[in-house]
Image (cartoon, helix red, strand yellow):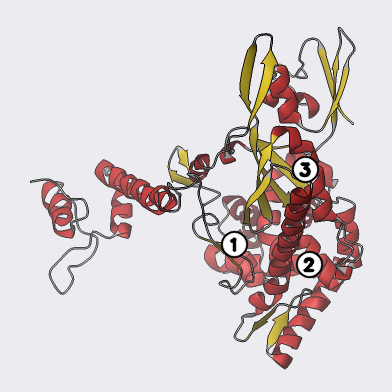
Amino acid sequence: MIFNMQSGTQMQEFLYEFLELKPIKAKNEKGNISVAEDVLLHYAEKENIEFCKLLINARKLKKAKNTYVKGFRRLISDETDNLFHTDFWLHSTRTYRSSATLFQVIPKHGDIIEGIPWQTIRKIFTRIEFYKQYQCGNYILNLQEGMIGEVDYVGAEVKVAAAIAEDDKLIEDLNNGYDQHSHWAGVIFGINKPVDEIKAIHKEERFLAKNNFTFANLFGAGNTSIAEEFRKSDFYIDFVKKAFQKAKQTKGFNKSWNEFFKDYSEQHIAECQDVFYKRYSGVKDWQEWVVNRYYEVGYVENPLGFRRRYPMKRNEIINFPIQSTSFHLLLHSLIEAENKMRELDLRSKVVGQIHDSGYFNIFKNEAEQVMDLVEKCMTIKPMFKWLGKVKLESEWELSSNNWLDLKLENKWFEAKHLDSEEVFKEKFLHGFTETMGMDTDLIIKILAGKKDKEDKLYRLPGWEFKYV
């Protein structure tokens, strides 16, 4: 008989009769023993049963295949262009962002199984095939000129929050490129160092501040929810244990570790939040105003006039104007860019959008023009008076292969050939390096001033590179 991994009966027989595993749950009313996911996970992780490890991995791979690979296949048009065609809806989400079938829900972090990241699925999306003919003596070469590009706003939601809250200090920090995450890492963990030093040395502290504190405060999170996230971090556990050991030495202390950890973390975060809102008092005032206004009129309205109505939780009330506005800034920019690209009769096209990012198929010879055009559409917004003094920024990532291989590129640089002293001033790094037969990764390291294992600066013999 063929073993069916989807059969609960066969799985029970295999686990509890053949492998003779000890059940961790009682039989149900029908006399069956559970073979649910949490049970298999227990045997895999706690009892190190190899079969259960393999079975869990097989199920994860099958889910990825059925959800994404087969799901994408159903959205590819065989009869016309063999391209993936999703739907973009503007009315189906309560956040007033867009939604798209499958395209917007590919996990960005983590692994399907160990060694196979979810981002691998992005290999499905490749550059469109643009070809250009080159005359080489008696030969005509058809070379691939297509690229895939992604552009997004730098700190879109934080800048929108600063603009609608009219918080002058937050606007000043953002416009000056002040590293808020390093600053708040210093406040939380008592690191009395310059922010650039904190960024370079205290990476774990900065990561926690960025993901669990800075953004959380802007979106109105309370100290209990932020503290709960911090308590999941081994790094923060070690940090609080030092305070616990010190507290144990005081007279009359009788708290358990769990009790102390919860109380200390919530009090600690509350104190840090007081410092945060003292610096960004405009944000706090706006949060209180928008919540009170919601209870007065029964809806929240963003600067573009979109409204979301009752019922809403406090964090949703504060989140909605920020997230919805960030998306519509991008949408406005993509529409404007698409119209201008059509006016200029460019072959490059807008092909998709995810939250604050837009995606393009780009003809290599048009890349510099497209990047500059889109950048202007995204950063120059005189029609939106509510943006005030906030400076918008965008950044590009490009690949001549697929979506997974995108690399940052939006700076001008000079490449000087030392023998001929010929100087190339370029912005389009990938196009230049491929044309010259260079290693793009190496040039990026040279431009960034990176060092090799021998602590020597990366070099390319015969060439000199610098940003301009």
Give the residue at mark 2.
161
Residue sitting at the far front: 138
Q: Residues within 10 Å of mark 2 (few under 14, many from 20)?
A: many
Question: Measuring 59% from the left and 73% from the top, which residue is drawn there?
Answer: 91
In this rendered view, identify the residue nearer to me: 19 or 366.
366
Q: CA distance from mark 3 to mark 1?
A: 38 Å
Q: Nearer the viewer, residue 263 or 404?
A: 404
The percent coordinates of residue 391 (x first, y second) are: 87, 56
For numbered disc 3, what is the local secondary structure?
helix
Q: Earlier in the sequence, mark 2 or mark 3?
A: 2
x and y percent of residue 256 in the render?
53, 66
Q: Is residue 362 visible?
A: yes
Q: Residue at x 18, y 63 (%)?
A: 33
Locate residue 6, reporting x and y percent.
22, 55
- Residue 359 location in percent, x, y? 65, 48
Q: Amino acid at mark 1?
A: Glu
Check disc 1 and report the residue beneath it.
229
Question: CA gap, disc 2 to disc 3?
Answer: 26 Å
Label 3 sits on residue: 371
Q: Nearer the viewer, mark 3 or mark 1?
A: 3
Mark 3 residue type: Met
Dot 1: element: helix
Q: Are marks 3 and 1 in contact (CB under 8 Å)?
A: no
